[in-house]
Amino acid sequence: MSFFLRRAGQTLFVLVGIITLVFFILRLIPGDPVSVIAPSASAEAKAQIRAQLGLDQSIWHQYALFWGQIAKGDFGQSYFFQGKAIDLVLAALPYTAALAGCALLIALALAIPAGVLSAVNQDRLADRVVLGFCLVFQSAPNFWVALLLISVIAIRLGFPTVAYVGPISLMLPSLALSISLVAVLTQVVRNSLVGALHSDMATAMKARGLSLRRIIFVHSLRLSCVPLMTVIGVQLGYLLGGAVIIEYIFNYPGLGLLTLNAVLRRDYPLLQVIVLATALIFLLINLAIDMSYGLVDGRLSPGNSGSRRSGRALRAPRAIAGGGDVG
């Protein structure tokens, strides 16, 4: 419980810091939302609009009002879109969640078998082929992959390339978003599994007559899940950031496209809510990953004492870092 409370406090502190940083950056960079709202209006009309939006107040007064509104559950009205900023974000969030979820599932479905194949055949032809594909996938920008999928697959096979017309609309965007992630996760699985297969535990299991298949899929792969979960938590930021470009290319009505429109229009309230929602999701998922380590490996349970965590629990990463040929 103390671990959870400590991490929850850290999450809240980081969240407040992110929102504060974004608030001041938006108002200190050159540009004015009023010039976007009414570019040809007179100076008097612009001053009136600025007063209506509260932008004529000092930045510290705006900051105090901002937190006062949040305390009341009021996240403000969008400058350009009809409705409250929070409603716009909640309407777009399920689309981005579905896109990121599909991309992650595709990445795991490809990375785990490829990583196992590469680890079992370390330094052989299959290993070199897998690592070669990883290098290509990791070097390919997701926007280039998206354009390639549109020109090669969508146009020839008739897949929808713009907007959202059903679950089939997720296929190409999620595939484009998952390519780089496949390369990263494959290397994590491969390196972790190579180390696990050369650990003392694996050697003892071989001596007991256990098959290589059982050692991999019952014991070693479970240990590989710990670094895999860590990397997934870190790569969540890549998924959310890459979704901005992918959603723009496919005109996908998610949080990424909404973010781009808000940035171009300098929609302060909408951008602040988007950052708040994105940061909260990122922090909560990483908190959940930290709490779930104990389910994969009991030695990493948050309930363990500090000495046990620093002693026994940290032996797994050292074992995973090993190398050598798999016999």
Image (cartoon, grey):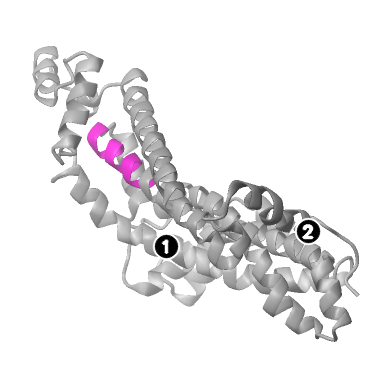
Q: Nearer the viewer, residue 15 or 318?
A: 318
Q: Position of residue 308 (x, y in %)?
A: 64, 52
Foreground mark, 2 or 1?
2
> What's the CA distance linking mark 2 and mark 1?
35 Å
Q: Position of residue 27 (x, y in %)?
A: 31, 21
Q: Nearer the viewer, residue 148 or 283?
A: 283
User: Does residue 282 appear in this view?
Assistant: no
> Which residue matches tag 2?
319
> Which residue matches tag 1?
99
150 on left or right of 36: right
Magenta highlight range: 268-278
Q: Quadrant of residue 43?
A: top left
Q: Amino acid at mark 2?
A: Ala
Q: Tell me the residue at 76%/83% (across/down).
A: 213
For the stretch drawn in magenta, the main secondary structure is helix
Q: Quadrant of residue 23?
A: top left
Q: Position of residue 32 (x, y in %)?
A: 26, 22
Q: Earlier in the sequence, mark 2 or mark 1?
A: 1
45 on left or right of 235: left
86 on left or right of 118: left
Q: Position of residue 257 (x, y in %)?
A: 35, 49
**Secondary element at tag 2:** helix
Q: Tell me the residue at 36%/56% (across/down).
A: 251
Q: Are marks 2 and 1 in contact (CB under 8 Å)?
A: no
Q: Is residue 269 magenta?
A: yes
Q: Tell me the residue at 18%/20% (across/down).
A: 55
Q: Is residue 292 magenta?
A: no
Q: Quadrant of residue 44?
A: top left
